[in-house]
Image (cartoon, helix red, strand yellow):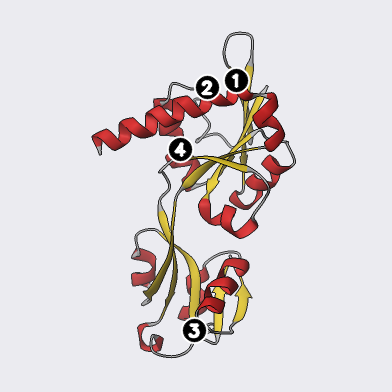
Amino acid sequence: MLTVALAKGRTAEDLVPLWRESLLPCPEDVLSSRALVFEVDWPPGERIRFLLAKPMDVPTYVFYGVADLGVVGKDILLEQERAVYELLNLEVARCRLCVAGRPELAAETPQRVATKYPRLAESYFRRQGQVVDLVELGGSIELAAVIGLTDRIFDLVQTGATLAANGLTVFDEVEQISARLIVNRSSYRLKSTEIATVVEGLTAAVRRRRVHA
């Protein structure tokens, strides 16, 4: 059985249409059900299993071989640096990893930064020659800058609407982010035929989208 771990939320929502366009098997209710594990036939006589996991957990499942394949944002791969192979840029769930804050603080040297990405944030500010106090938060990173807990945030930005609604602005764009297909190193050898079929189908679907973009 081939097992695929999908990052819940926007990544899965953007991936599922692409997955179906690739003519690969996909559970009908994968986005609507509250279940976390799904199995479907593929091809006749075999099965493919999908796991819905928190984005930060997907590389862990793939690294330890609980999942053969995973779909997760490049931001998480950069932050964790797990020993997995990155096979394909799926070009969905696009966003930007940015530094942002209140406009009136743009000219000031940052002192404290809120983020979900401590390793990436530390590396970024070190390259700027700046030493900052990192505040790790699990959600609503923008709130930290709004209430003055920090003078910067280091986080993903999709449209910028949430920043604008809270009086924040982007100071710097650090990295372009999109969903990536990753694979367990052992599975890449042991299940090469099945994995090649998935990669070929998704690659063709990504190329078709580019043509019609």
Tag in front: 3 or 2? 2
**x then y, percent, for residue 90:** 44, 40
**x then y, percent, for residue 33:** 55, 34
Amino acid at the residue labelled 4: Leu
Q: Secondary structure at mark 2?
A: helix
Mark 3: few/some/many CA within 10 Å (<14, 14-19, 20+)? many
* Residue closest to the eye, 26 or 175: 175
Residues at marks 1 and 2 touching, judged by CB atoms closer than 8 Å: yes
Mark 4: few/some/many CA within 10 Å (<14, 14-19, 20+)? many
Tag in front: 2 or 4? 2
Give how far apart the Cα atoms at labels 3 and 4 are: 34 Å
Disc 4 designates what residue?
A: 15
Residue 174 visible at all:
yes
Amino acid at the residue labelled 3: Asp
Q: Secondary structure at mark 4?
A: helix
Give how far apart the Cα atoms at labels 1 and 4 are: 22 Å
* Residue closest to the eye, 156 or 75: 75
Q: Could you tell which of marks 3 and 4 lies nearer the N-terminus?
A: 4
Residues at marks 3 and 4 touching, judged by CB atoms closer than 8 Å: no
Mark identifier at residue 23: none
Residues at marks 3 and 2 touching, judged by CB atoms closer than 8 Å: no
Q: Could you tell which of marks 2 and 4 lies nearer the N-terminus?
A: 4
Disc 1 designates what residue?
A: 193
Residues at marks 1 and 3 touching, judged by CB atoms closer than 8 Å: no
Give how far apart the Cα atoms at labels 1 and 2 are: 6 Å
Mark identifier at residue 197: 2
Q: Quadrant of residue 208?
A: top left
Q: Could you tell which of marks 1 and 3 lies nearer the N-terminus?
A: 3
Disc 3 designates what residue?
A: 151
Mark 2: few/some/many CA within 10 Å (<14, 14-19, 20+)? few
Q: Secondary structure at mark 3?
A: loop
